[in-house]
Image (cartoon, rainbow, N blue to C red):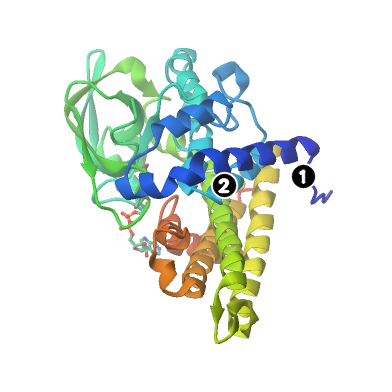
């Protein structure tokens, strides 16, 4: 069955998010981007409206949205700010999905419920200085000592530094066994031997405060291990489709934002005695944005629809949606800056920030080069489509 219409509830949710984004986010986004500050006060307001928590069931503090409704909301918010878009899906994405699927009842109550309600912030520490894409090559180790694990190593480029109360993170019991020896843990800020080091002055994604997580003889209680010993990679991987869906939604929203801004600017900017909207090369850029946004939106909604229907694995579709939507977003942002001429470089307009953030969307949740390889491998029969 193919139905391209959103339901009345989904439209109402979309309108609610749009109103919030315009009133509560747009007036502040340039400032918090400049300050490289995660706007906790805005996220708290979103939480009060039930905008964070994504698909986490009500029983665990979330709004229990279906994936498509969540996707529509993230996209809408991301027309203004991809970071507030991200806040809408984190609890059912990389940060919370592992807890929901592998956590004990006690872990869900202690960590997932406050996260999904927006009472606290959490993070996920996967990337290491020497292993980003190659997650299985992690070097952080965990050794069991009585009722504790002792972690040594570090993670880098981790979102949430300075605001997260805890991190879902990963360490191997045996480097030689790599991923097979990996375990997942919740490490709270304040655990002995744990430290955070912020990374400042980033090119982009400035409001998403990132940094390094350092574990030096860091003691983690056994009850904070998520899943069994050796389950670490499964815990990490269970969230990737939701994470890629969130990135794709943010990319579609950002690309739509570029289109909106470009249309507005092209109509009012007069050069050579006529609005630049009259120049065919400007029209061509706008047309490419429309094609990109609409195709990316359908691929993204298809992924969300498959997830809503409960398909177990949508790996191929998640790579296709993430890859296409983020490529579209980057191209749209570059063209939007071009249309704005010098004003594209000004903080007064959104498109410069969009261009910086669009680049990072091509890197997080699996670099686009890897997704391109995966899509090729599926097509060539070199990799089995798990669906
Ligand atoms: C703002 C920001 C926020 C982030 N937040 C988090 C977070 O919260 N948690 C977290 O764990 N990580 C986070 N990351 C890290 C991010 O997920 C990694 O940067 C990403 O996975 C890529 O890893 P890397 O940087 O080590 O790149 P590398 O793995 O070193 O790859 C570098 C380049 O090599 C090429 N390449 C590598 N492998 C392949 C391959 N198999 N096939 C083809 N080409 C390849 C690609 O061109 C790739 O871009 C964040 C990063 C940024 C910038």
Residue at the bottom extreme, as displayed: 272
State left or right for residue 294 relative to residue 27: right
Looking at this view, is 72 or 96 the one in front?
A: 72
The answer to whether one can see residue 377 in this image is: yes
The residue located at (48%, 37%) in the rendering is 87
Q: CA distance from mark 2 to mark 1?
A: 18 Å
Q: Is mark 2 within 8 Å of ligand 1?
A: no
The mark tally for this picture is: 2
The answer to whether one can see residue 383 in this image is: no
Assign a secondary structure to mark 1: loop
State left or right for residue 152 relative to residue 354: left
Say which of marks 2 and 1 sits in front: 1
The residue located at (50%, 28%) in the rendering is 45
Q: Is residue 68 above or below residue 191?
A: below
Whichever of labels 2 and 1 marks the residue nearer the N terminus, that label is 1
The residue located at (43%, 46%) in the rendering is 29
Mark 2 crowdedness (10 Å alpha carbons): few <14, some 14-19, many ≥20? many
Q: Residue 316 sits in which quadrant?
A: bottom right
Q: Is residue 276 above or below residue 198?
A: below
Q: Position of residue 234 (x, y in %)?
A: 46, 36
Looking at this view, is 376 or 30 the one in front?
A: 30
Q: Which residue is mark 1?
A: 6
Instruction: Give me the disc on residue 61.
Output: none
Assign a secondary structure to mark 2: helix
Q: Position of residue 58 (x, y in %)?
A: 61, 20
Q: Which residue is mark 2?
A: 245
Q: Are marks 2 and 1 in contact (CB under 8 Å)?
A: no
Q: Position of residue 298 (x, y in %)?
A: 69, 56
State left or right for residue 168 relative to residue 286: left
Q: Position of residue 26 (x, y in %)?
A: 50, 46
């Amino acid at each position: 069955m193919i139905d391209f219409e959103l339901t009345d509830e989904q439209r109402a949710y979309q309108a609610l998010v749009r109103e919030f984004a315009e009133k509560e986010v747009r007036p502040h986004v340039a400032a918090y981007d400049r300050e490289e500050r995660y706007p906790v006060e805005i996220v708290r307001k979103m939480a009060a409206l039930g905008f964070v928590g994504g698909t986490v069931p009500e029983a665990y503090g979330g709004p229990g949205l279906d994936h498509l409704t969540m996707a529509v909301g993230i996209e809408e918010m991301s027309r203004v700010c991809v970071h507030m878009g991200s806040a809408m899906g984190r609890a059912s994405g990389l940060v919370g999905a592992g807890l929901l699927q592998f956590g004990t009842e006690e872990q869900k109550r202690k960590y997932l419920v406050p996260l999904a309600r927006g009472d606290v912030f959490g993070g996920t520490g996967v990337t290491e200085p020497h292993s980003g894409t190659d997650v299985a090559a992690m070097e952080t180790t965990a050794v069991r000592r009585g009722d504790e694990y002792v972690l040594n190593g570090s993670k880098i480029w981790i979102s949430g530094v300075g605001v997260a109360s805890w991190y879902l993170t990963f360490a191997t019991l045996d480097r030689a066994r790599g991923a097979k020896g990996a375990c997942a843990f919740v490490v709270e800020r304040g655990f002995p031997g744990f430290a955070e080091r912020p990374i400042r002055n980033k090119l982009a994604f400035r409001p998403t405060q990132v940094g390094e997580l350092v574990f030096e003889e860091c003691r983690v209680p056994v009850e904070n291990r998520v899943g069994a010993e050796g389950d670490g990679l499964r815990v990490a991987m269970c969230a990737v489709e939701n994470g890629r869906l969130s990135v794709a939604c943010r990319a579609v929203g950002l690309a739509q934002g570029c289109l909106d801004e470009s249309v507005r600017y092209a109509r009012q900017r007069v050069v050579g005695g006529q609005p630049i909207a009259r120049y065919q090369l400007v029209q061509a850029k706008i047309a490419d944005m429309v094609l990109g946004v609409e195709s990316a939106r359908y691929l993204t909604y298809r992924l969300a629809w498959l997830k809503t229907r409960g398909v177990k694995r949508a790996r191929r579709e998640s790579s296709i949606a993430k890859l296409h939507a983020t490529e579209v977003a980057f191209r749209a942002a570059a063209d939007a800056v071009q249309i704005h001429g010098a004003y594209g470089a000004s903080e007064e307009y959104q498109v410069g920030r969009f261009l910086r953030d669009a680049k990072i969307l091509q890197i997080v949740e699996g670099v686009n080069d890897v997704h391109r390889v995966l899509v090729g491998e599926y097509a060539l029969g070199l990799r089995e489509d798990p669906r």
